[in-house]
């Protein structure tokens, strides 16, 4: 009887021990599985993070390349615009220089003509002999021009009033500076002289040359 009880007790102890061991083993296995799952999750997260980082790096690389290309295009456009501005500036400078050269030439020409008219001896006179008054005295380029053409130029350029009959070779001046023919008698009027001599032809038909002196005189008796 005692042996049976002892055997039962031993069996119970062994059973309890086995059950306890089995429970511990199960806990260990469950813990191991949980750790494996957590480890796998961590590894998955690491891989996912690596992939994301790789994607970001690639995306940044693409952006950098795109920005680099855009920057290159912008620089090319800026260089083109700069070249166009330089060309326009050069053309503008050339145009200004040409205008200045043209203006300088014109000014020199005008100065030259002014110097001629002031430094050269007068070769054209318009004189009112009745009132002893010089209406005009100056130098004019008269070479190969008719006395009529030179007279018209002087009157127009100096804004001296006049009246003329006929044109070209038949031109006749009936009034200059308000003095009209017959104002001081039936024979009074304007007559022209070249080198002090009264020509026998009209002013429109007489051709002057360098060195000549043309004089217009209002005379009381133009027939003398």
Image (spheres, rainbow, N blue to C red):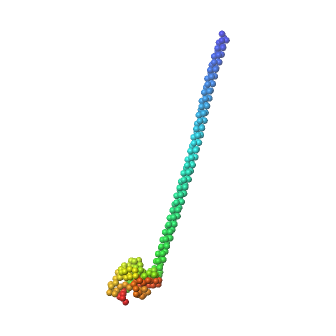
Asked if residue 127 is positioned above or below residue 79 in the image, the reply reads below
Left or right of 19 in this view: 146 = left
Seen from the viewer's position, the closer of residues 196 and 138 is: 196
Going 41% across and 83% down the picture, which residue do you hit? Answer: 205
Asked if residue 52 is positioned above or below residue 90 in the image, the reply reads above
Q: Residue furthest top?
A: 1
Place of residue 33 in the rendered image (x, y in percent of width and height, measured from the top left)? 61, 29
Q: Residue furthest bottom?
A: 224
Going 44% across and 86% down the picture, which residue do you hit? Answer: 195
Going 43% across and 82% down the picture, which residue do you hit? Answer: 146
Seen from the viewer's position, the closer of residues 44 and 193 is: 193
Place of residue 165 in the rendered image (x, y in percent of width and height, measured from the top left)? 36, 81
Place of residue 127 in the rendered image (x, y in percent of width and height, measured from the top left)? 39, 84
Instruction: Give the mark count.
Output: 0
Q: Residue furthest right?
A: 3
Place of residue 101 in the rendered image (x, y in percent of width and height, measured from the top left)? 50, 70
User: Can residue 136 be seen from the camera position used here?
Assistant: no
Tell me the quadrant of the picture where the N terminus can be found. Answer: top right
User: Can residue 55 be seen from the camera position used here?
Assistant: yes
Tell me the quadrant of the picture where the C terminus can be found. Answer: bottom left
Asked if residue 161 is positioned above or below residue 196 in the image, the reply reads above
Left or right of 63 in this view: 137 = left
Residue 28, by quadrant, is: top right
Residue 197, by quadrant, is: bottom left
């Amino acid at each position: 009887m005692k042996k049976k009880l002892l055997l039962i007790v031993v069996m119970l102890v062994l059973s309890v021990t086995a059950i306890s061991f089995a429970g511990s083993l199960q806990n260990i296995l469950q813990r191991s599985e949980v750790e494996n799952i957590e480890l796998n999750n961590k590894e998955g997260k690491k891989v996912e993070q690596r992939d994301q980082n790789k994607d970001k790096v690639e995306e940044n690389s693409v952006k950098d390349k795109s920005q680099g290309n855009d920057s290159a295009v912008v620089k090319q456009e800026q260089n083109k615009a700069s070249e166009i501005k330089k060309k326009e500036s050069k053309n503008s400078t050339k145009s200004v220089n040409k205008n200045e050269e043209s203006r300088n030439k014109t000014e020199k020409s005008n100065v030259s003509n002014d110097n001629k008219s002031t430094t050269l001896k007068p070769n054209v006179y318009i004189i009112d002999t009745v009132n002893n008054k010089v209406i005009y005295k100056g130098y004019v380029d008269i070479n190969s021009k008719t006395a009529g053409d030179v007279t018209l130029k002087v009157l127009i350029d100096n804004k001296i009033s006049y009246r003329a009959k006929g044109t070209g070779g038949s031109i006749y001046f009936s009034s200059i500076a308000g003095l009209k023919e017959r104002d001081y008698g039936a024979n009074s009027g304007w007559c022209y002289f070249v080198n002090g001599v009264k020509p026998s032809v009209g002013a429109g038909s007489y051709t002057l040359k360098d060195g000549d002196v043309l004089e217009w005189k209002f005379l009381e008796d133009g027939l003398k």
